[in-house]
Amino acid sequence: MRYIQAASKKKTIQRMVEPITKEIWWSMILHGISGGLIPVLSVFSMEWITSRILKSNVEIGEVIKIIALVSLGGFCLEIIKTQTERRTYNKINLIRMNFLKKLMHKTMTMDLKYYENPEFADEMESCIIAVQSNTNGIEGIYHMVYLLGAKLLGAILLAIILARINFWIVVVIFLSVLFTFWTLTKISDARYQRKEELNQAERRNFGYGHLTTDFSYGKDIRIYNFQDRFLQSYENEIQNLEGIYRDLFLIERRFSLLSILGLVFADLFAYYILTTNGMLTFQVSEFVMYLTATSIFSLMMNEITEDFANVHREFAYCKDTIGFLDMNFITDESDKSYAPGTPISVEFEHVSFKYPNSKKYVFEDLSFKIEPSEKLALVGVNGAGKTTIVKLLTGLYRPTSGRILINDIDYTQFSIEDLHELFGVVFQDIEPLAVTIKENVAASSKDIDGKRVEMALRQVGLWDKISQYEKGIDQMLLKIINEDGAVLSGGENQKLMIARALYRKGTQMMIMDEPTAALDALAEEKIYREFDQIMQGKTSLFISHRLASTLFCDRILLLDGGKVLEEGTHDELLNYDGLYAHMFKTQGKYYQEVEKNEKQASVESI
Ligand SMILES: Nc1ncnc2c1ncn2[C@@H]1O[C@H](COP(=O)(O)OP(=O)(O)OP(=O)(O)O)[C@@H](O)[C@H]1O
């Protein structure tokens, strides 16, 4: 793998043993002893019962007594075995959930450059596989190892019994089992080697499933007839997966045939020795006992082999998960705190940047400064790099070269938490979370100041709407988790996100990336009018395609070809008569025409 390094065997075992509590260990011992004695009891009971039945003067009462005692013993052992297993099942499940929690934390805190990288996502899939199921991965191994104790003890005791007839029976069965283990590991190794291909195919399959079931794509799929296109692509994905599975199946078929041959040979050998040696030396009851012991031993050894092979298979994924959890995916981590308490200045100093998987630079040698409390508008054509500037400024990505300074200090010196605390950001692709309105605004579930939530909602003009809900700011949003959740419109969501940026106490700079794109003209006009009050004197960066909306800003930067092409106030740039003036006039003409058409339409309708 390129990004994630699997942990060593030793470290993986260490990490997996750490969370096992004393209670689980004791349960395992109790389960192992009770489960291990059951097959031995069955084997001896055959001898006890047969010898009584074959006596010339059969005493039915005695036979029934033995059957009753054996059944009672078996019942007690079975109860201990199943009860200990049941009680421990949930505890093992919790261990897996804790691993999953750590993985979720890692995923949510790692640098965005990993999160946005599909190659990384494919590698991460192997780590997720190990924590998302009860029967596979980490939890699967715990369950299998837990159950193995009983099987191993049973097999050892039976091996001791069988070794009394002929030591070679045990040796041959053991060798055949080793051979089966080898074949099974070959099969699982083949699968593991193709895991990235499989993950990639599964990710794309999931992607198509998501596309067709996520209702936000529903309208476009129907209107633009994407159905055939998606079904065709999905068909290709099925064929791709089928190809991989076919290759794996061929390997599986070859090795499983070999393993079956090994097992048949071992069984034939054991029964041969038993019949040739045993029939001459043993009584019938002993013979029955050894016959039963041989078949149970052979079955148990097969089960044990399969369990070991499964543990071997799943362990490979666990090594990836532990490796992932132990690795650091946060760059330039500093624990130095920083809380200036006043509006900040921001400076890009000869910054060059390209995305990790890309050869093309978005900027080369970009320099500009935003003074404390200054309101700067950033404009430019699509793809000019405006959002990338926000990602760099907020530390979601770091410059490839050059420095970003906050209050003249290199921002890599501050802890990422403190850096994030400085910014109230509203991105263009906004999505509220499926929690209450107040949690959405406060971005927290604890210590929420209801008054501040209300004030922020009033400032963005959303209070009238929210106060109409019976539960007010305690109303849940979205229907994914709560079917009574409220669904806000695109513009209302955008207002909610602005309210979130305003709520934060530590915010010293407001960043608005197309914050009004989904707002209606009245709401947009109101927000601009009240922008000074909304921004509360904070340093502000405002990105918008509607150039008229930049009028209230102190300065405008026009970004083009990875450089600052023009810079100045709105009037200065109009006088300069460059690209900004051209864009503004074109937009102005468009808006004037729309306005003219609307007026004409209303006159005609009268
Ligand atoms: N995660 C990414 N990986 C690789 N390239 C990216 C990534 N995100 C953006 N880009 C590329 O970086 C360039 C700048 O993108 P950015 O989103 O910053 O532009 P923008 O000016 O905000 O565009 P718009 O006005 O359309 O929102 C684009 O060429 C885009 O394709």
Image (tube, rainbow, N blue to C red):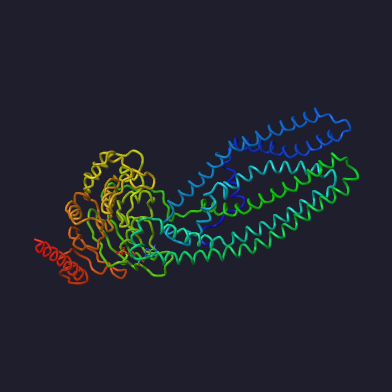
Q: Nearer the viewer, residue 290 or 517?
A: 290
Q: Is 425 drawn above or below residue 587 in the view shown?
A: above
Residue 460 in the figure: left or right of residue 65: left
Q: Quadrant of ligand 1?
A: bottom left
| Front position in the image: 530 or 199 | 199
Q: Is residue 463 left or right of residue 162?
A: left
- Image coordinates of residue 603 in percent, x first then y, are 9, 63
- In the rendered structure, the answer to whether residue 126 lies left or right of residue 151 reads left
Q: Quadrant of the C terminus?
A: bottom left
All told, the count of numbered labels is: 0
Q: Residue at x 72, y 60 (%)?
A: 258
Q: Residue 517: horizontal and vertical position, in percent?
A: 25, 58
Q: Position of residue 71 (x, y in %)?
A: 72, 33
As rendered, which of 91 and 323 lies closer to the eye? 91
Q: In the figure, 60 relative to 366: above or below?
A: above
Rendering quarter of residue 46: top right
Q: Residue at x 22, y 51 (%)?
A: 535
Which quadrant is the N terminus positioned in? bottom right
Q: Position of residue 503 (x, y in %)?
A: 28, 45
Q: Nearer the viewer, residue 567 or 596?
A: 596
Question: Is 574 positioned to the left or the right of 33 in the image?
Answer: left
